[in-house]
């Protein structure tokens, strides 16, 4: 893949990174921000981002083609899974949605450009403006690419120079996205730098952290705690740690006419990014007492996953992951052989997909990689009770419920602690305006200046 050497991540693998090189990169980023980014209006930045996104949605776009050609080998996802994930991400980056998002976060779409007032602020003769950090550092995770791309979008919107530290072997999509911005607007791309190295390189990270004003990091809770202890006191830290998600299907929606649609939506959530993101379901709870039982739902979901494997295959799994899946399968197959309350369906001659039905409603962490539990529950209260062990880690709950009950169920889940409730089938496709882990994505980055007139 022949890309110009615009970013550190483009250098040959044998090129060594040094603290001095990173220091020079940080100084250059700050200088470029002063020259090229601070002078941009929000509208100008939005037009660039929406224009770049529109290009990525075109089948003939060269960066998209490179992603789909090299992604399966470098990232471990099939071409079809990558294409669906890219369409979902870039389809959200429209001018209208950007403006609505900024207004949602700041009360006025002009907040990042000038001092302005909402109606309430006008009554007290106040105005305010929000501005982002001078240098924003992203410590990216290595499971799925979209969060890293979104971090880059956030940095540009808040007019921050940014350094993206990618996980080993995961620079492909961030690099291609940065290069596509460069092709569209070279000066804007000059405010972005990225590189990759194995986490815990103290010499490199010490320079990066010392030069930063804000650090965002995605990873395990232990990794986030380690990063936080190494940051200077003045540096703002935004950590996105371990999260889990699950689905809930009410008995009323599993009618003979509607069940196929619900099962297809569940399969959408299990196959999206091969179930590797924090928004992917580990368990799908099916309410008992309906036209279709939870066990029947599991059997039909297995049939659907078998079909999906022919049109959107799972990516390759490392040998140790395949061995772990096989060992988990063996445990449940042994249980199934001795109890009617457990059943297992699986792909033949591979670990491509697995469905385990259990009558026991206790929440269970999945192996991921399209390994899904289906469990029977008496209702949403029973689900909440059985998932209480992961209450503090729950991100998204995908629901398929009657419209007249949806508001009540969403309220129960919200009061319990879920930070996002969405339709089943949309769990790995959050809207642009989603509040990540219950926090305002743009709002957490900025500092406000209030003017009391």
Image: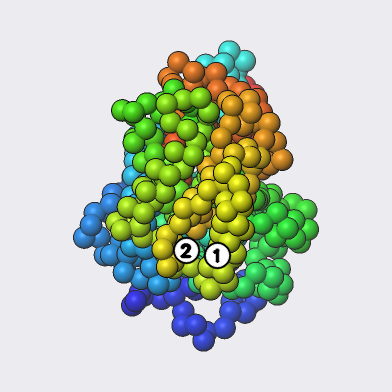
Are dots 1 and 2 in contact, CB under 8 Å?
yes
How has the structure been colored for display? rainbow
Q: In which quadrant of the rendered view does residue 320 lie?
A: bottom right
Rate crowding at label 1 as few (under 14), some (14 to 19) or many (20 or more) other CA atoms within 10 Å: some
The disc, 1 or 2, on the residue closer to the chain's N-terminal end is 1
Q: Is residue 112 above or below residue 121?
A: below
Whether residue 2 is visible, yes or no, is yes
User: Disc 1 versus disc 2: distance between alpha carbons?
Assistant: 7 Å
Towards the viewer: 291 or 40: 291
Q: Is residue 436 above or below residue 194?
A: above
> Hey, which residue is sitting farthest top in the picture?
123
Percent across and percent down for residue 214 are 64, 52
Whether residue 36 is visible, yes or no, is no
Quadrant assignment for the C terminus: top right
Towards the viewer: 69 or 200: 69
Give the residue at mark 1: 326
The label shown at residue 309 is none
The label shown at residue 351 is 2
Percent across and percent down for residue 7 are 46, 71
- Judged left or right of residue 226, residue 130 is left
Q: In which quadrant of the rendered view does residue 81 lie?
A: bottom left
Quadrant assignment for the N terminus: bottom left
Q: Is residue 137 above or below residue 339?
A: below
Q: Secondary structure at mark 2?
A: loop
Q: What residue lies at 60% left-to-right and 64% top-to-bottom? A: 327
Towards the viewer: 36 or 304: 304
> Hey, which residue is sitting farthest bottom in the picture?
14
């Amino acid at each position: 893949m022949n890309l110009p050497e615009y970013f550190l991540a483009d250098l040959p693998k044998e090129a060594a990174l040094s603290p001095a090189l990173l220091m020079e990169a940080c100084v250059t980023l700050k200088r470029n921000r002063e020259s090229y980014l601070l002078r941009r209006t929000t509208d100008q930045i939005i037009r660039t981002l929406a224009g770049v996104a529109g290009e990525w949605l075109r089948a003939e776009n060269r960066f998209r083609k490179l992603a789909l050609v090299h992604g399966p080998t470098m990232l471990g996802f099939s071409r079809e899974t990558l294409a669906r994930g890219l369409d979902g991400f870039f389809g959200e980056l429209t001018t209208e949605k950007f403006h609505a998002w900024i207004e949602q976060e700041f009360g006025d779409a002009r907040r990042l450009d000038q001092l302005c007032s909402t109606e309430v602020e006008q009554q007290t003769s106040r105005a305010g403006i929000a501005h982002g950090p001078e240098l924003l550092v992203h410590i990216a995770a290595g499971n799925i690419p979209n969060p890293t791309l979104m971090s880059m979008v956030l940095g540009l919107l808040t007019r921050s120079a940014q350094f993206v530290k990618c996980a080993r072997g995961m620079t492909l999509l961030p690099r291609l996205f940065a290069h596509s911005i460069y092709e569209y607007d070279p000066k804007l791309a000059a405010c972005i730098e990225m590189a990759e190295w194995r986490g815990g390189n103290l010499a490199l990270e010490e320079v990066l952290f010392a030069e930063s004003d804000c650090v965002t990091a995605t990873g395990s809770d232990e990794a986030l705690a380690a990063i936080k202890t190494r940051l200077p006191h003045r540096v703002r830290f935004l950590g996105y740690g371990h999260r889990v998600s699950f689905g809930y299907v009410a008995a009323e929606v599993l009618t003979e006419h509607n069940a196929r649609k619900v099962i297809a939506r569940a399969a959408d959530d299990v196959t999206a990014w091969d179930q590797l993101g924090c928004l992917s379901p580990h368990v799908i709870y099916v309410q008992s007492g309906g036209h279709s039982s939870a066990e029947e739902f599991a059997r039909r979901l297995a049939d659907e996953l078998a079909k999906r494997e022919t049109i959107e295959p799972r990516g390759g799994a490392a040998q140790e992951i395949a061995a772990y899946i096989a060992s988990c399968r063996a445990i449940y197959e042994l249980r199934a052989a001795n109890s009617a309350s457990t059943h297992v369906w699986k792909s033949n001659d591979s670990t491509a997909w697995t469905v385990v039905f259990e009558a026991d409603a206790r929440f269970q962490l999945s192996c991921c990689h399209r390994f899904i539990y289906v469990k029977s529950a008496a209702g949403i209260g029973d689900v909440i009770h059985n998932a209480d062990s992961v209450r503090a880690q729950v991100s998204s709950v995908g629901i398929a419920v009657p419209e007249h009950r949806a508001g009540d169920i969403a309220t129960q889940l919200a009061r319990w602690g879920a930070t996002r409730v969405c339709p089943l089938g949309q769990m790995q496709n959050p809207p642009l305006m989603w509040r990540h882990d219950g926090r305002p994505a743009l709002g957490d980055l900025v500092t406000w200046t209030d003017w009391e007139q």
